[in-house]
Amino acid sequence: MQPVTARPAPVPSADEARAEGASPYATISDHTRPDIANVTRRLLILFALVAGLVAACGLTYSVAWQSGIDSLRLNAAGRVDRTTSSLKSTLERYESLPYLLAEHPIVQDVLVDPSPANVKRANLYLEDLNRHARATVTYIIPLNGYCVAASNWQGPGSFIGAGYHFRPYFVDAIKGGVGRFFGIGTISQAPGYYISQPVRRDGKIVGVAVVKLDLEWFQGADAFEPLVVTDDHGVIFLSSVPAWKYHTIRPLSGQVADSIYQARQYAQQPIEPLPVTIERKLEGDAQIVRVGGGRYAPRYLASRRGMGEPDWHLITMAPVSPVDADARNATIVTGFGYVSLVLLAFYWRMRRARVREVMRSRALLQKAYAELNQRVAERTADLSQANEQLQKEVSERTRAEQELRAAHDELIQASKLAALGQMAAGITHELNQPLAALRGFSDNTRVLLERGDQASARENLEAIAALTERMGKITNQLKLFVGRARPRSARAPAVRALRNAVALLQKRLQGVELELALFDVESGTRSPLDLAGDHPDLIAHCDDLRLEQVLINLLGNALDATAGMAAPRISVHIEVTAGSLSFAVGDNGPGIPEDVLPRLFEPFFTTKEMGQGLGLGLAISSSIARDCGGTLVARNAPQGGALFVLTLRRPRVQTSHTADPLTTGS
């Protein structure tokens, strides 16, 4: 179909105009008047569009800049809080060091009697303390103000003999307070933070203990944005910008400047004001400042935080130039978007006019109507076919669910059979040791009866009865392994359980070197372990039979590991702490392969040959340890062989072990 083109209306001639009673010159005036109106309307539209562009760009720049400043302010506030917390935690970590130093007898002795022997002892002690505490220098000053001992006594810049009576931290400590001071050292010429405490002897102040810390690392810890720290007078003593150091953010009075000069706080550095101009104040103690002179001086968003004690202020300077650049970019994007929208609206209007003319054709409407009916019919057929397919899928899913239920029932039955098999295997494994012992005791009893040794035969029969009772308890305890039952208040004497386990394996232990030791972790004492003793304080939170069961399994595994060794050796060490007991069972066997360690406690996993083990001993032992609130771990010992560590809780025991960290060298 050809597009319809609008033709211009014909202009009437002069004769036609006179025939109609009109002047021929009136036509020019009538056409000129609408043209002027169209031009005026277009100029107004153009003016409105330009005004809208200016307003949109201005609003975008204002919103983008304010949003960027808010985001920058929040980030700067978080950064200054984190940095302040880091600096404060560093200072607080060393806050108690001068106090501990002042309480030490060596420090008090050298201040009361500065003899060469006392001075040497104090120098060695301060050197060792300073090395462990990682401070810069620690030193001691008597009442006369001249250092008598220091940690750097051997260095070329030793503080010994230097006078510090003019330093504020010395004056504050002599008055009985805590001295805090940042300044440049008079000897080392290195800046540092000084913390001092008065040293008292018999209630009297006899001197001052001082710790110096180097904080120069702090100014480079976060150097991607300028960072400064000022003292209580506003003097910058830490800065990531070296040119800003030892400048003040506000003018100093004559009295303050004289006090700084007298205390030699900054080694007579000329302290001049930093050229800072405040352009705008924001909420949250933040300001937009310009550092330097001229309109092109960099602008920063300054965030300030006070540290409290000492009276320092930490200021972070976030550059504002990225925010300005982002606001300009957003304004440019908005301008291009606005122009694009105007052009798109103009194109859409023209297109709409053309489409409106084209859609007036009745033939296209009839054709579209016919196509619509055809599509409706095709869609109806598709829906019917989809409905049939859906019904078929529903029936197939119903049948699959029925098959799934049947398979689930079969799986439950198979799980029951597997559980019965594991129970039978567990009973077989756990009864092997008592059955072997019963066999040995019964053979020995028969020999004793033939000899007429009734007393020994009676002891063997009592042992057989005890083993029979033990086998009954084992079958009951296997229920706890299957049901995950946890004993609540069971307590077992550790030495008695180890003694019973060794007695049960006495025959297999012949020819094996058995090392028994007891180690008290708190006191650091180690002694041989006597199984004949009672040791009533070594109690573990576990059933006595289950503890014996674990120890028998661990000793049995150690015996199997040392079977082929020329000089088999097994060690059992009991480590005692205030809240736990640890049984460390080691051997000098070949050790545990690395690929076996992850699977060592899995049920039915064994490295023994067929018929020599079911692979349930360690699995049952690990389950018993967990049920009792303890742990069982395995690793290879550094000196060779395997090492199994069983850790169990014990009742809280009152101990009287005390230690002085200064006297023990901690």
Image (spheres, helix red, strand yellow):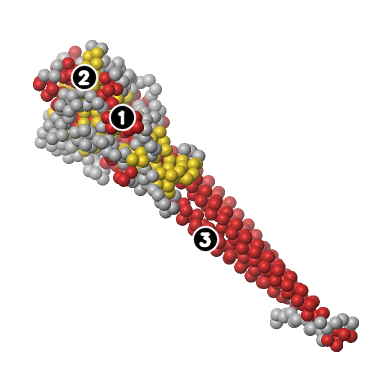
Identify residue type, mark 3: Ile
The mark closer to the camera, 1 or 2, is 1
Label 3 residue SS: helix
Image quadrant occupied by the N terminus: bottom right
Label 2 close to label 3 by CB (< 8 Å): no
Q: Nearer the viewer, residue 44 or 256?
A: 256
Label 2 residue SS: loop
Residue denoted by label 2: 143
Residue 332 placement (x, y as % from top left) = 52, 60
Q: Residue at x 85, y 82 (%)?
A: 23
Residue denoted by label 1: 259
Residue 538 visible in the snapshot: no
Q: Nearer the viewer, residue 27 or 66?
A: 27
Q: Which is nearer the N-term, disc 1 or disc 2?
A: 2
The quadrant holding residue 505 is: top left
Residue denoted by label 3: 332
Residue 279 against residue 521 in the figure, above or below: below
The quadrant holding residue 533 is: top left
Residue 459 placement (x, y as % from top left) = 21, 16
